[in-house]
Amino acid sequence: MQAAELFGEFLYWKATEPVDWVLNTNSMPSNQFIDYESTTYDFTPGFRVGMSMEGSWNTNVAWTHFHTDTDESIAGQLTAAFLGGKESQPPSPKLYFDTGQLEARINYDVIDWEMSTPVDMGTYLKVRPVIGLRGGIIRQSFTTSFQAAYVNGGTSSQRFVVEEAESNFWGLGPKVGIDGEYALWHSPGLEMNLTAGFFASYLLGDWDIPDKTTITQIDNGVTTESTRLVKVDSRDFASLSFQTMVGLNIRHGRWTAAVGYELNDWLNQCQVFTDASGPQNNDLLLQGLTASFVLEF
């Protein structure tokens, strides 16, 4: 007998992917320091929706959407970490920017298609080997802004620099894994199960990495504008990702509710190039609460 389920999941995740965007220094002998500032994100809501068909083989299709952003600002003796801003530093004797701001965003959309078959491992334990496909689009942007005011050779100057760097990935590839549940409580009208799963995917895809800087220079009230393009070739290779989750579900009639912890680790996902540490190749880690509600019909 086949049964269909519609499900929706509430996500409350935190993204972790440190990217250096500015170097702050103080050359005063009494208080010297050198400090790189990196991107940090807070917990943000997202969602997953989908449908599954259960039978001798189970089929599951799901779409996961997550968006997060961060805004930061800093003052001091600043050096831009991204290349466009670094090449636009104020001239000698100023050399440093006075203030800087960052706006960073991550847009995450992933579609999973899975097939699995349940295997009973005894009275209480059931496992499901999983095979399928995963497709994903992960778009990241880093907008840095820097300002400086200085006097050079009798000329009163201001410099405003805005750099927009992106790391945009799309990919498609196989997904394999295993999940299962262990019965904690079974009665005719109620079930309670401990659940766990581990999956890996290998997405063949492409990174597009545009980087544009706009420089506005004001000298004695006269404004000039210029642009710089940092050319980074598109990168065509696979992205490896791992997904794991543990949780608890409760079934009553046609309804199932579940809550758990989920972690998604995308290796080498951020491919921007900075003067701070060269190619970033940073992992994107998404983790946090996942809560779901399922209706069987």
Image (cartoon, grey):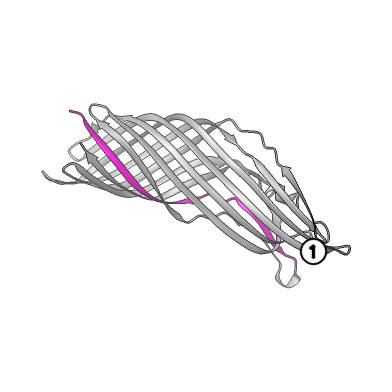
Horizontally, residue 97 falls left or right of residue 207, namely: right
Q: Give the percent coordinates (x, y) of residue 98.
A: 71, 63
Q: Is residue 237 visible?
A: yes
User: Where 53 sits versus 152, above or below?
Assistant: above
Outermost residue on the right side: it is 153
Residue located 71% across and 48% down the image: 214
Dot 1 alpha-carbon crowd within 10 angstroms: few under 14, some 14 to 19, many 20 or more: many
- Which amino acid type is marked by label 1? Tyr
Residue located 51% across and 40% down the image: 138
Q: How many labels, in total?
A: 1
Outermost residue on the top side: it is 56
- Towards the viewer: 124 or 45: 45
> The N terminus appears in which quarter of the rendering?
top left
Outermost residue on the left side: it is 188
> The C terminus appears in which quarter of the rendering?
top left
Residue at image mark 1: 150
Horizontally, residue 279 falls left or right of residue 290, namely: right
